[in-house]
Structure formats: C-alpha cells, structure tokens
Amino acid sequence: MPSLPTLSGLPGLAVLRAMGKDRSLLAGLAAMHKHLGNAFQITLPGFKPIVFVGPEPNRHILVGGRDDFLWRTESDPVTALLRHGLLVEDGESHDCLRAVMEPTLQRGPVNGHIDAFWECTATVTDRWADGGEVDMLVEMRKVALLILMETLFAVDFRPDLERLWRPILASIEFISPGAWLVWPGAPRSSHKKELAELDDYLYGIIRKRRAVYAETGQLGEDLLSVLVGHREKSEETGDEMSDDLIRDQLLTMLIAGHDTSTALLAWALFMLGSHPDALAEATVEARTVLGEEPPTPDDLKQLTFLDTIIKETLRLYPPIHVGNRRAGHDTEVEGYPVPQDNRVMYSIYLSHRDPAHWEEPDSFCPARFDRSQRESAPPAFAYLPFGGGPRNCIGATFAQVEAKAVLGKILHDFDLELLPGRVHEHMGATLEPRPGVKMRVQKRRIAENS
C-alpha cells in the first residue's frame, strides 16, 4: 500500500511561495495538489489531515465508503456549538432527524416560499440609496437572514436583525478555522455572551410556538412548527422533541443555511460585476422574464442564463469548499491508508478547478453549464457544491431557488456597477469574498418599463 505524499524540499518551498504571493491557504492547497497529486497529507503539529481531490475519492467518501467516515469530532468547536444538530450527528440519530426535517425543504414547500424570497429581498433593497454604494456581502447576509427566519421558522426577524447581528457573526467566528485546528485546547475567544444571547432568542421562539400549539392545537408547516409538533414515536403518546434538541436544529439551520446563501449571493454579484457582458445579459433576461410581482416557479425556470451564472459561481467559489470527516476505523481511500480517527478532507474547491476535468478551470465561463452548448459533462462527483450521496446538503433546493429569486429581483430593479478594490477568498465557516463586494446601485428608471 503506497504511503501518502507529504511536503518536503522543493514542493514545500513552492507551496510557501504560493501562499505568500496570494496570502491564501487555498493557494497553498492548490500548490500541494499540483505538486503532490490527488492525495496528500498535511503534516503540522497536531493537524495531520489527509486531503483527497477528484471524482473517485469524492464518490468513495460520500457514497461507497461513507459508513467508514464520521462527521462528529468532539474536540471541534462546531460540535460544541451545534451539540446534536443535524450537521454533526451520525448514524441513526442523523437519519431520524433528517427524516423529520427534509420534507419542509423539498421542491413543493420551497416553491411556496418564492413570494417571501422576493419580499425579503425588497425589504433590504428598498433601503438602498439611488446611486449609493453598498457592500453586497453585508446586504446579502441581511437578505439571507430575513428569508431563513421567515420561511423556515415563520418568524418576522426584522425587529431583531440589528440586535442579533453581532451574536450571529460571533457564532460563525466560533466555528471558523483557527488555532484550534492545530491546538485543540488553545485559548480562544468564546463569544460566551453573544452565543448566550442567540440561545436566549432561539429558546424564546420555541417557547412561543409551544404556547400557540398548547392554546390552539394548530401548527404551521414551517420547520420550527414541524419540530415542535414532532413526537419521537409514531403513537400519539410518544415523547415530544426536547427544547434543547430543537434549539440544536434551529441553530444548525440558522448558521449553515444563511451563511452559505450569503456567500453564494455575494460571489455571484461579484462575478457579474467583474464580467460586464454577463451582467448585461443577466439584466436583460431578468427584466424580460420578471415583472413587478413575485415570480412563479415557471418564471424562475425561464432565467436560464442566470442559472448558469449561479452554477458557475458555485463551481469557482463553493461556499463549503472542503468536506470534513473522521475515519471511524482503519480504512483506505484510493489505495492509501487512512488510520482510525484521522481527519479526512475532500476538497470541493480543488475538485471544481481540476484541469483533468475542467477546461480553463480558473476562468469564469457560465456556458459550461449551458446544456445546449457543452459537448460533454464532467464526470459525476467532479462538481459537488452541495456534497453528494445520502448526506448531501438538505437545503440544496432551497438555496438554488432562493438565489434565482434574490438575484432576479436585484437585477430587475437595479443597474449595478462593481467598484474598484481587491477581493480575496476568505476561508471562514464558508468561503467568502473579503473584505466585501462594493457596488454602486442605480434604481432602474421608470422610462424603461414603458
């Protein structure tokens, strides 16, 4: 069995040069991939993940050998924060939670939220000054938060957005990569006060929903209501889901659901602003297909060029850029040994930019997702912005419909101009454009409508 390649000598210097030039860990990973191939091990004190790139190892980790790998790592802050949230549960616990939650995120319920996607976007964009400058990273976070809270929790978040802005950012910072990766016991800012404030809010909306249920015997079809009304057994006398377990699911969806959408929307606007021809075509399409009222599902299906923009953005800048697992026992991937408890990462970012499967992989080319133009599709598991297999992203449909509705609304209502300034990839809880996406927004002139 071959040993895993590691950095030494000239390849190590090349990686350091790449990281120094771009000031990016992703640049370092890309250099390691170039010099070491599709499987390699990072060897830092206390941090020795095995990294895999490409469709075959992706398929093995996500499907063929998925039972060999665990999500939960007790020493990780994400486990400490989410406790027993869907994202960090394994086995039967995960499967049971997913069976309860998944129906609220299927195509039918998601299409029923399109009006809310449209209206929440308007709530934010109506405050943009005509001809003013906005940071789309900040603005899209506002949109994503309002949408998630209104659709999945049936809560009007507008009165609490400003108050809980810092606690929400603190929760993201808490689970973002940091010194804890190489030093699990490293002293770190715990954001204890902010996280407690966010918990108080979540427990509060759970109590309110329980009170409504107790008084009326009625619940809605949103995720919070489904969790409140769920009983762990099929019999009517079964135990209710505890407030703690519901909190864990709400916090999981709040962080994972809104932060990934924030990154996707901000990167899409950055790519449109960076490619004026694509921006012009997407704007014409939005103004041809969409009107003043919220679109129907069929309207969104007609936004075919915008769909390719979204897919290409997800290829270049997948919000979750790396999948993280832990070997449950001694195993192997692609013939390489993986010892029990070793951290295993499959790089979505590098798989999406692998020249073996993508022509001009670093170029922005929406046409590669236009079925009428492309000659062949990449192999399965070469493109996996939402993961794959039985544990693919539970919110994949939600995110794609949301992105079309939000971007369509913005393009319909505004002329956009990307302002000068360097934007780099930031490896936080998601892959974000930092320091932000600054754009000038000009309200569409009424004369264009006549």
Image (spheres, rainbow, N blue to C red):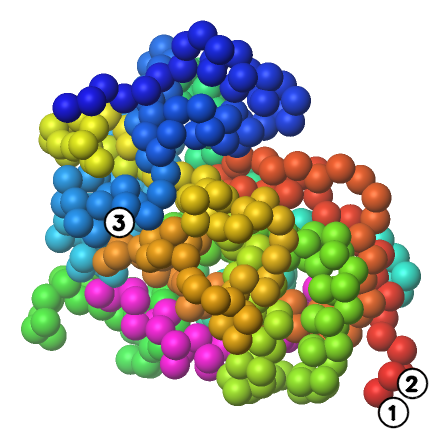
Q: What is the chief secondary structure element of the magenta stretch?
A: helix
Could you tell me residue 373's position as x and y percent?
55, 71
**Amino acid carrying mark 2 in the image:** Ala
Find disc 1 in the rendering and name its residue: 450
Residue shown at 53% from the left, 35% from the top? 427
Could you tell me residue 63's position as x and y percent?
21, 52
Q: Is residue 314 magenta?
A: no
Mark 2 Cα shell of 10 Å, populated few (<14), some (14-19), many (≥20): few
CB within 8 Å, label 2 to label 1: yes
CB within 8 Å, label 3 to label 2: no
Mark 1 Cα shell of 10 Å, populated few (<14), some (14-19), many (≥20): few
The magenta stretch is 99-127
Q: Is residue 107 magenta?
A: yes
Q: Quadrant of residue 347?
A: top left
Q: Quadrant of residue 388?
A: bottom left
Mark 3 or mark 2, whichever is nearer to me: 3
User: Which mark is on residue 447?
Assistant: 2
Q: Secondary structure at mark 1?
A: loop
Q: Is residue 210 left or right of residue 148?
A: left
Find disc 3 in the rendering and name its residue: 59
Residue shown at 70% from the left, 52% from the top? 270
Q: Is residue 350 left or right of residue 434?
A: left
Q: Judge by depth and name the residue closer to the eye, 283 or 107.
A: 283
Could you tell me residue 22's position as x and y percent?
64, 27
**Amino acid carrying mark 3 in the image:** Arg
Residue 146 visible in the snapshot: no
Residue 346 lies, with reference to residue 300, above or below; the image says above
* Measured Cα–Cα span from mark 3 to mark 2: 52 Å
